Amino acid sequence: MTNEPSIAPTEVPPASGPSAPAASPSGPESRRARGEYYLGRITGTAGSNVIDSLQDMAPELGHWIVDFAYGDVFAGTAISLRTRELATVSALTALGNAQPQLKVHIEGALNVGCQPEEIIEVILQMAVYAGFPSALNGIGAAREVFAGRGIAMPRRAPGAA
Amino acid sequence: MTNEPSIAPTEVPPASGPSAPAASPSGPESRRARGEYYLGRITGTAGSNVIDSLQDMAPELGHWIVDFAYGDVFAGTAISLRTRELATVSALTALGNAQPQLKVHIEGALNVGCQPEEIIEVILQMAVYAGFPSALNGIGAAREVFAGRGIAMPRRAPGAA
Amino acid sequence: MTNEPSIAPTEVPPASGPSAPAASPSGPESRRARGEYYLGRITGTAGSNVIDSLQDMAPELGHWIVDFAYGDVFAGTAISLRTRELATVSALTALGNAQPQLKVHIEGALNVGCQPEEIIEVILQMAVYAGFPSALNGIGAAREVFAGRGIAMPRRAPGAA
Amino acid sequence: MTNEPSIAPTEVPPASGPSAPAASPSGPESRRARGEYYLGRITGTAGSNVIDSLQDMAPELGHWIVDFAYGDVFAGTAISLRTRELATVSALTALGNAQPQLKVHIEGALNVGCQPEEIIEVILQMAVYAGFPSALNGIGAAREVFAGRGIAMPRRAPGAA
Amino acid sequence: MTNEPSIAPTEVPPASGPSAPAASPSGPESRRARGEYYLGRITGTAGSNVIDSLQDMAPELGHWIVDFAYGDVFAGTAISLRTRELATVSALTALGNAQPQLKVHIEGALNVGCQPEEIIEVILQMAVYAGFPSALNGIGAAREVFAGRGIAMPRRAPGAA
Amino acid sequence: MTNEPSIAPTEVPPASGPSAPAASPSGPESRRARGEYYLGRITGTAGSNVIDSLQDMAPELGHWIVDFAYGDVFAGTAISLRTRELATVSALTALGNAQPQLKVHIEGALNVGCQPEEIIEVILQMAVYAGFPSALNGIGAAREVFAGRGIAMPRRAPGAA
């Protein structure tokens, strides 16, 4: 009998709201539209708040986030949004010097359908690859996000010792 | 019409070879057995070569890798091995100071059924979160691994600009 | 006449409290017992508070801290606990992204018998190897810990310019 | 019966060669003399080779290494040279991006009387605080240094599992 | 017609206050005098406040900052103080783990005559080389500094998209 | 008499070759044209070689480098190309985990008119902000680049001790 992990839940397309614009055109209107779609899909209103807050100091950084980070990079279709967000949570946990952005992407992972247990497990994996402090501080970030969303943590799955 | 990414391919249980030992018992024999299973499943023979090479200098580090990293941490069942390896590839790409281990886990991602395009895409995501040098050097690591395995890279999926 | 540094003070075994369990058995009860011993010896009650706080989100991380970090890694006998803690303080100062854990281990260094001057000196060494910001921020962490413990800092030893 | 680690071996003053100049004077001749003493004491001839190699490009960096790093920072007497070198080895292992300097200080630790087992143990400690890749790469650096010095590694002390 | 960037404004020597002491003598009085000059020129009173705050815990770190960091390293004349401060702002933004010092040097850049737009632009450059989180957090640091100085940000120069 | 650093040499517009395309249009043809201009201006042929080498594995990363990194980010006109490259050299030196890219930008700094002494001085500044290993390894990268270009290093300017 195998106890290999079961397949993670299927990603459910958004029940409401716009669909993603066509990925391939690279003109400014398409990149902007696609970027705004993914920014909202992943970060809810938090992302546009960040963009707005940049208007005084560095509006171009806001454009680059929408057009490049979310418009170009998120256009790739080889991985799901869930995998993309779990990858970002892992990396930001490992780096340990970007806690505001880590929280944004823990929220993002939840927004695109990741389960809290999945998020916790990629953070814990970082205990091996970046050390226990990075994992502890990542769990701290997740705790804040989960509390803010009223997520009550159940006991972990039986695979945990 | 939506162009949200399709679901990543289903993870196929190993066609041959041993199944994972039961996850929950935490005694030394179980941790060792589980760790050796996952070490082999993910790293092929590369992992056990590393463990063997540690026998002279630091055998306990070898034990910790098998028992803790692969025995305890990999026992979690909330995420698939594919997600786990993509998370690790992302983090090691972002850190940029562990290229030997990054190559091991690019191999590992392939070994557990990730597609080359999936691996490339999580590496590219790191251009946003850790900078272009980290992504360039991660692609360099992937190039070495893919060449060693005779993987000919097709043109990327149309979602890429 | 030489002014090579004198030998650091002898480590004094704990005046009271339990002795460390035998190091070698690797079964779960032994690892747990040894880990709990060292967790308490080094972190006082702070460590068990951290473990308790993990019960909701990630109890397995708490187990790994006790069993692996303190049970397995601290079982090595080639270095004293004082050296071990000074090494950890140095590394966390250099990394600069784990200030909560740095404070825990500055406390830990004091708990196992390090002098405040020893702690300060390994932190200052990091000005050379990781830069002045890391050393300044490490001194800031030490200041908080020393103040909380009522440690009044004397003038530094004459070897300081 | 306790199995707390025994006290690390006493640091033995150099059997031959110059003694350290008086620590306190801060004039250029004193800093230079003290720095050259410690540079040689710790790095053998490797350090002066580095200083010489800087003459073409950046002679002032060579001066700063001798006068500041070894003249000023190493003048502190609260910790022994052994502790200082073990702290540096730990930090450079954790940082993972300074392997040439890590090897210099593994050599340095041996030169000032650290045992190979002590060096290995502080490197292994970094598996907890900076992740397994940092410890693996640190062991790799130590392996090169030990081989170059003909150090045959015995089995580790019984505290190791 | 070219739109290559125009030359950045000329650095204006201080209208009042002392001139820099002669650079070359390396005796303690000269290093101290030169260091105190540059510390004040760059950090205003913030730097001497930091030095004062170190008197209890680590006065030698204060000496090293004045004598070495500002006395020796800033004595180089191949680059202007403006370039030096912009380089430091870039590096501290990229490192992402030294926000207090980043703010000191954003202030420092303004103090030596950098325009706010120059500071913002080197921070934004770090989105490419260290990732968007580092640039976002650097802009956050700049926002605090600019607000504290009553700097109202105009719209960015037309080269920005 | 002041010995404040003199103003760095004026940046001379390219004597031949294309001028930079107009900065403001953000359409794909303009971004591409501007990016290719700056890629060549800064990296010579090295940059286009990197882009070509990405065609098999990750052509989109090549597009992002040209269009975003060099097309969008380099379009800012508040700083000169010389300042931009010195900032990048500083940051990559401090990070210490991107030596291939550091060499590209040391070359780039020379290509846009920086003097070797300016490059060395920003690298040396990193001894203060990121530690001596980062500066040593940065000087090593510069040595390789300068040797490859037949740059014979003169003695440093008198401001150096």
Image (cartoon, coloured by chain):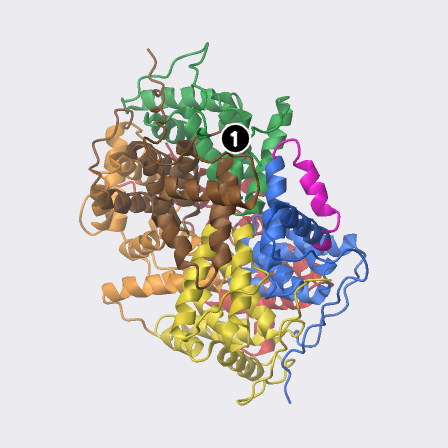
Chain colours: A blue, B yellow, C red, D orange, E green, F brown
**In this picture, is B84 found above or below E113?**
below
Q: Is residue C40 visible?
A: yes
- Tag 1: Cα neighbours inside 10 Å, few (<14), some, or many (≥20)? many
User: Residue A108 lies in magenta, yes or no?
Assistant: no
State the image coordinates of residue D137 (x, y, percent, origin top left): 39, 62
| Quarter where residue B54 is shown | bottom left
Q: Which residue is mark 1?
A: E119
Amino acid carrying mark 1 in the image: Ile
Q: Which residue is at 35% across, 24% downward? A: F8
**In this picture, is B16 found above or below D87?**
below
C94 left or right, relative to A139: left
C9 left or right, relative to A81: left
Secondary element at image label 1: helix
Which one is nearer the viewer's eye here, F77 or C53?
Answer: F77
B111 left or right, relative to D50: right
Question: In the rendered structure, the residue with mark 1 lies on which chain?
Answer: E
State the image coordinates of residue A87 (x, y, percent, origin top left): 59, 61
Tell me which segment is drawn in magenta: A41-58
State the image coordinates of residue C6 (x, y, percent, origin top left): 35, 46
